[in-house]
């Protein structure tokens, strides 16, 4: 099964964050669109992508647009990852059976989904493809009602694709 695509109904996620708080996508959708980024800390492509995901959060995350990560690792290792990579958005912990990851049909990480207020996936990206991440950032701008900003900095060397 491939990861859920555009137009699919987003499965409910209700997980605990690395700080011990419960969070539900359904509750977050009451405030506005939600972006969910699934990852595994040992994944080199996730490590490469996370600074760009943090940029999306810092540029567009606000009271009307929620950005969350979902880690496939334990709380201690995830907290270390969050600290090392300067992640400021909330990070939730998938359970040991990867229930949330499986509901979203994940085959690779990172996998990013923008869920609209109607509960359907509006944009998805699997792995690291520069153009896909730019589409995710543009969708985040629209969701937050903000003007789009360049995701990649001038002079920054970013490959079109990063295999994992």
Image (cartoon, rainbow, N blue to C red):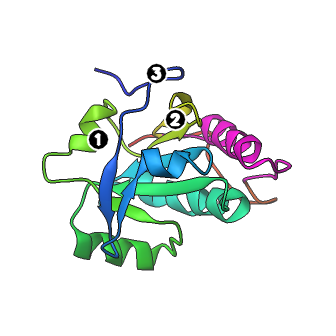
Camera sees residue 67: yes
Residue 60, disc? none
Residue position marked by numbered label 1 in the rendering: 101
Is 146 in the magenta? yes
Give how far across and how far down residue 106 sits, in percent: 32, 34
Q: Earlier in the sequence, mark 1 or mark 3?
A: 3
Camera sees residue 40: no
Q: Quadrant of residue 118?
A: top right
Taking 142 as reference, is 12 left or right?
Answer: left
Distance, label 2 to label 3, CA atoms, is: 14 Å
- Locate the N terminus by quadrant: top left
Give how far across and how far down residue 90 sits, in percent: 46, 66
Taking 159 as reference, is 98 left or right?
Answer: left
Farthest residue to the right: give it.
147
Residue position marked by numbered label 2 in the rendering: 125
For marks 1 and 3, give the one nearer the viewer. 3
Q: Quadrant of residue 63?
A: bottom right
């Amino acid at each position: 099964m491939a990861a859920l695509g555009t137009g699919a109904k987003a499965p409910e996620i209700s997980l605990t964050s690395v700080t011990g708080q419960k969070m539900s996508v359904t509750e977050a959708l009451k405030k506005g669109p939600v972006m969910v980024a699934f990852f595994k800390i040992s994944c080199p492509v996730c490590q490469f992508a996370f600074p760009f995901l943090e940029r999306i959060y810092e540029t567009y995350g606000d009271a009307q647009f929620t950005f969350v990560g979902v880690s496939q690792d334990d709380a201690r290792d995830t907290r270390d990852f969050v600290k090392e990579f300067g992640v400021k958005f909330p990070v939730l912990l998938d359970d040991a059976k990867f229930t949330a990851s499986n509901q979203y049909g994940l085959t690779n990480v990172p996998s990013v989904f923008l869920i609209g207020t109607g509960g359907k996936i509006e944009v998805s990206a699997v792995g690291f493809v520069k153009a896909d991440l730019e589409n995710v950032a543009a969708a985040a701008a629209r969701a937050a009602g903000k003007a789009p900003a360049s995701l990649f900095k001038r002079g920054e060397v970013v490959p079109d694709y990063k295999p994992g």
